[in-house]
Image: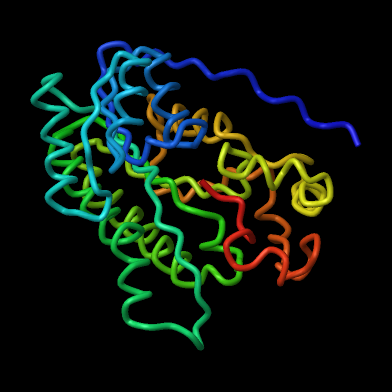
Amino acid sequence: MTKTKLSPEARIDLSGQVAVVLGASAEGGTGWDVAETLAANGAKVVVGARSLPHLERLAAKIGGTAVRCDAGSEEDIKALAKAAIDTYGRLDIAVNSAGQPVMGVISEMTQDLLDTASRVNFFGATFFIKYMAEAIGTDGSIIFISSMSTTHPVFPHIAYAAAKSAADCIVRYAAIEYADRNIHVNSILPGAINSDMAKEAFADPEFARIYEREIPLNRVGVPSDFSNAVLWLAGPSYVTGLNLQVNGGNHLTRMPRIDEMPGGAEAYGSGKTLADR
C-alpha cells in the first residue's frame, strides 16, 4: 500500500509572541515537538514539566526558558504562567500537552483511581485554562491536547478518557467565557502517535498494520502532525471551542481492540493498547 507523504512543516509568523508549553520533557514526544515548532516559527517559549533536566536541554536547544511544573498542581500551574510574564513580559499562546495515563475498567474502579485520572487530565487542565487566560489578558490562544479515546472507546482507559472528556467540555465553556477578550480556546484529539514512546511497538509490522487499517490516510500520526495543528490554532483564526480530531480520519472508523493486537490481550496488557504521548 502506498503511504501518504508527510506534510511539510507549517509556517506561521509568531515573531514577538510568547508561548507556554506544559508537558514538554519527553524528547521526541508531542509536547517537545510543539515547543520546537512554536520556537521555529518565531515565538519565545517557556516549557514546563516535572523533569527539569530534560526541560533544560529543550530550553537550551530552542532558546527558551525551563520551569519545573507539576501538571496537576494548581500552584505550579499558576507559577508557570507567572514565569512567562516575569521572563518575557507577556503571554500569547498556551499549550497543555500533559497527560496522566490511567488504566482500569468500571468494575474495578476505585476512588483513588478516579482521583489519579482527574488530577492532571481534568483538574490540572482546568487550572491551566484559568491561569493562562489571566496571564494572556486579551488576544491569545489556549490549546489542550486531549485524546481520541474521549470519543472512541479504548479499553481499559476508561478513567483517563472520562477525565480528558471533562476537559474537552471545559474547553467549550471556556471558549464562551473568554470570547469577549478574544482568547481562543480549543482542544486537539490525537489518535495513535508514533512518538519515541511508541516507536518500538510500531516497529512491529503487524502492530502497525492493525492500526493503519483503521486510518483512512493509511498511517499513524507523528508528533509534527499535532504540532502543525497547534500552530494553526495558535495563529490568526476564526476558530474557538473546537475539539479537533487530528488522526488521519481514524475518528470515521474505530480504534483497534486489544484482542486484535499481535499475541492478544495477554501479550500486550492494558498499557500497550493505546499508542499515545
Where in the figure is residue 112, as x and y percent of width and height? 32, 77
For the point 33% across and 66% down, the residue is: 118
In the rendering, at what x and y percent does residue 237 appear? Answer: 40, 30
Q: Residue furthest right?
A: 1
In the rendered image, residue 92, in percent from the top left (x then y), is placed at: 24, 27
- Give the image quarter of residue 63: top left
Colouring scheme applied when the structure was drawn: rainbow
Q: Residue at x 38, y 25 (%)?
A: 236
Q: Residue furthest bottom?
A: 107
* Left or right: 76, with 148 as reference point: left
Residue ID at (51%, 88%)? 107
Residue 185 shown left or right of residue 164 in the figure: left
Q: Is residue 176 above or below residue 220?
A: below
Quadrant for residue 142, please give it. top left
* Observer-nearest of 168 and 146: 146
Q: Is residue 64 above or below residue 186?
A: above
Q: Is residue 130 above or below residue 36?
A: below
Q: Nearer the viewer, residue 90 or 39?
A: 39
Measured as percent of width and height from the top left, residue 32 is found at: 43, 31
Quadrant into which the N terminus falls: top right
